[in-house]
Image (cartoon, grey):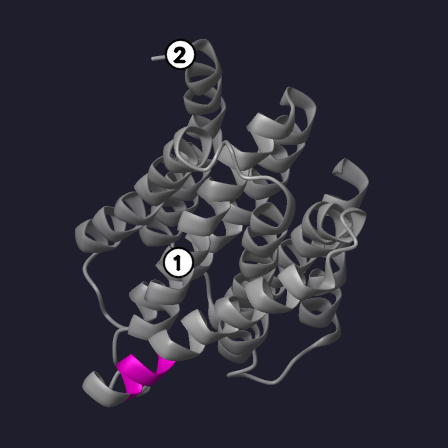
Amino acid sequence: MSSSLQLVVTYVLFPVAATIIGGAAAAIRPPGPRLKSAIQHFAAGVVFAAVATELLPEISREHNTPAVVIGFTLGIGLMLGVKWLLQRFAPGSKGADAPPISMTITVGIDILIDGLLIGIGFTAGAEVGILLTIALTIELLFLGLSVSVALNQAGIARGRIMAITAGLASLVLVGAVFGASVLAGLAGSALVAMLALGAAALLYLVTEELLIEAHERPDTLLTTTMFFAGFLLLYVLG
């Protein structure tokens, strides 16, 4: 293993651990509906900030509009394709007591893309990679919490919840290794398109999964504030 890849693997263990810890914490002591909504609002704010503070500046720096359009379109197409497949082959997955299949798969794709972004970030420089890792560690801690809460609410057994969140966490490592080894040579239009694809997937996660789940019960001033608290925290750290 090269020294650069070893560095990526070392740092990516932090978001892996954060995802597992978040999932285990919510599985052992499930939060109530109000806290669940607050967690999901906070996670949405953190993810939104990751797009605004980490991805969009990198994308804008290249001034490559065609690559942005292509990557963003592919990202939205990917997420809508997943949604269509779920509606086609798992039409009952959105029931009140049904396992949140759509959210789990969407989060899985997001986590894989997060890993890719970490791997690519380290190829652009250690500082960029470390900042991305810090941002995404916070994001994944709360994503792990959110998924675990949703699975618990659907009546999934505690051991199975922990296994699912651990499996999701492993996708960070897979994505990071792939990004650092296979996609390390990306530059120019290809890199911009990949970052735009990631931005689209993250925005989809915020608008179509986390916030929809969070709004299953009426908002309060606290839950709404948590979205902006998550955004501000990641912005300040970035």
Quarter-of-image position of residue 102? bottom left
> In the rendered image, which quarter contains the N terminus?
top left
Please name the amino acid that badge 1 sits on.
Ile
Magenta range: 83-87
Residue 5 x, y percent position in the rendering? 43, 19
Please name the amino acid that badge 2 sits on.
Ser
- Taking 204 as reference, is 148 above or below it? above
Tell me which residue sits at (37%, 78%) in the image.
81
Q: Residues within 10 Å of mark 2 (few under 14, many from 20)?
A: few
Quarter-of-image position of residue 157? bottom left
* Residue 26 sits inside the magenta stretch: no
- Taking 211 as reference, is 111 above or below it? above
Residue 139 x, y percent position in the rendering? 56, 48
Tell me which residue sits at (78%, 53%) in the image.
60
Tell me: 89 left or right of 124: left
Residue 113 x, y percent position in the rendering? 46, 50
Residue of label 1? 109
- Taking 102 as reference, is 143 above or below it? above
Residue of label 2? 2
> In the rendered image, which quarter contains the C terminus?
top right
Residue placed farthest to the top in the image? 3
Q: Which one is earlier in the sequence, the residue at label 1 or at label 2? A: 2
